Amino acid sequence: MPGETLGLVGESGCGKSVTALSILGLVQRPGRIVGGKILFKGEDLVRMPVDELRDIRGRDIAMIFQDPLSSLNPVLKVGFQIDEAMQAHDKIPKDQIERRGVDLLKEVRVPDAARRANDYPHQFSGGMRQRAMIAMGLSNRPEILIADEPTTALDVTVQAQILELLRDLNEATGTSIMLITHNLGVVAGLCKRVIVMYAGEIVEQGPVEQIFESPQHPYTWSLLRSIPRIDADRRERLRSIEGLPPDLIQLPPGCKFSPRCPYRIERCFRDDPQLKEVAPSQEAACWVTMKRAYAEMGAATITDTRPGAASGVRPPKGVAAKVVDARTIDAAEGPVR
Ligand SMILES: Nc1ncnc2c1ncn2[C@@H]1O[C@H](COP(=O)(O)OP(=O)(O)OP(=O)(O)O)[C@@H](O)[C@H]1O
Ligand code: SF4
Ligand SMILES: [Mg+2]
């Protein structure tokens, strides 16, 4: 929505970056978009001719990529790269480009911006490179800024500065921000609405406060329960989500979360649930939802979060999807993200 800050969350590998790249038509071969629509101001970006999409990309919808070091060209000065983004679109008058480039670096709080515009990316710190990427993303005053994990590689102080910067930009210019992250704390601090993804699909969406207060999809509920909280009872154990996300090429039938879900019922292995309203402005794709899990399956007191533990439902014969115990992997292959 115009002026909205939207968080897109989900485990590593659930398809957040691919979804964002699809919006800009940047999915790399052999990947391709096989269905659906991406509507921007009523027009479908999937069917739009390449030239027209190129005009929109970087001008109306800009993206801060997940890895700034590999997204900046190492042999070109940072200032030049920001100016180039503006030259590509003719939105900013030519005689204003250079000054705007330096102003943007100032705006994203790069110290001594006029001099640092002449530095190469390797002369910037990680946080400064991230800010240079944000400056580039903002250079054409886009209507939507997609920020793919803009703070993951940064220490918490710089992380806070970048988030504050994004908040200021949203408030000052009304730029809509889509923030991709697997940090729910970041979403709580910055976003108004959140979309939770699992295995390449939206499983829950709604206003941030409402979803944090009353998540209805067992995956969202599990994600929230796996975060350490400063106000939690000390004796309460953190509950990890057992198993791993499925291979996106070989998805299980029915609900994609069924191999890991403590609340699954038989139907979950057969039928794929679609998003439906579970509360005003909140949608979830689940046959059970947490309301029923609390009422019938003791969700409030559950301590065993293994697949099917709360409902007692085992996978039907032949569907025993590979469920890997996260603790086994932990021991064998080091920490799992
Ligand atoms: N819709 C899809 N269909 C098929 N494969 C997909 C789809 N989305 C993602 N993938 C595959 O999953 C991989 C991981 O996706 P992606 O990089 O988008 O994950 P991510 O959620 O951004 O993870 P991270 O948090 O680690 O950045 C991709 O490289 C791609 O191979
Ligand atoms: S209860 Fe069923 S539909 Fe809901 S998340 Fe669990 S497996 Fe999926
Ligand atoms: Mg990613």
Image (cartoon, helix red, strand yellow):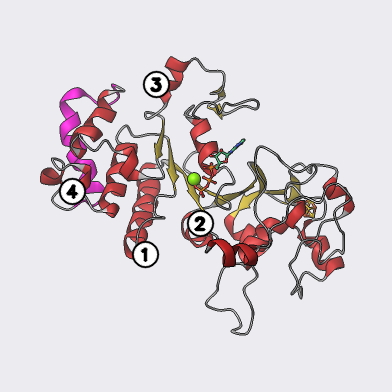
The part of the chain drawn in magenta is 90-110
Pair 1/3: label in front: 1
Point out the residue furthest to the left here: 115
Please report whichever mark, 1 or 3, sits nearer to the chain's N-terminal start.
Answer: 3
Point out the residue furthest to the front here: 332
Q: Is residue 60 above or below residue 185?
A: above
Q: Is residue 335 above or below residue 13?
A: below
User: Could you tell whether 67 is left or right of 128 in the image?
Assistant: right
Q: Position of residue 287 (x, y in %)?
A: 82, 50
Q: Is residue 238 above or below residue 99?
A: below
Pair 4/3: label in front: 4
Asked whether residue 216 appears in the rendered view, the answer is no
Please report whichever mark, 1 or 2, sits nearer to the chain's N-terminal start.
Answer: 1
| Residue where numbered disc 3 is placed | 55
Please report whichever mark, 4 or 1, sits nearer to the chain's N-terminal start.
Answer: 4
Please report whichever mark, 3 or 2, sits nearer to the chain's N-terminal start.
Answer: 3
Residue 230 painted magenta:
no
| Residue where numbered disc 1 is placed | 156
**Disc 1 to disc 2, C-alpha distance:** 15 Å
Please report whichever mark, 4 or 3, sits nearer to the chain's N-terminal start.
Answer: 3
* Circle 4 SS class: helix
| Residue where numbered disc 2 is placed | 187
Q: Residues within 10 Å of mark 3 (few under 14, many from 20)?
A: some
Q: Amino acid at mark 2?
A: Val
| Residue where numbered disc 4 is placed | 123
Label 3 near label 4: C-beta < 8 Å?
Answer: no
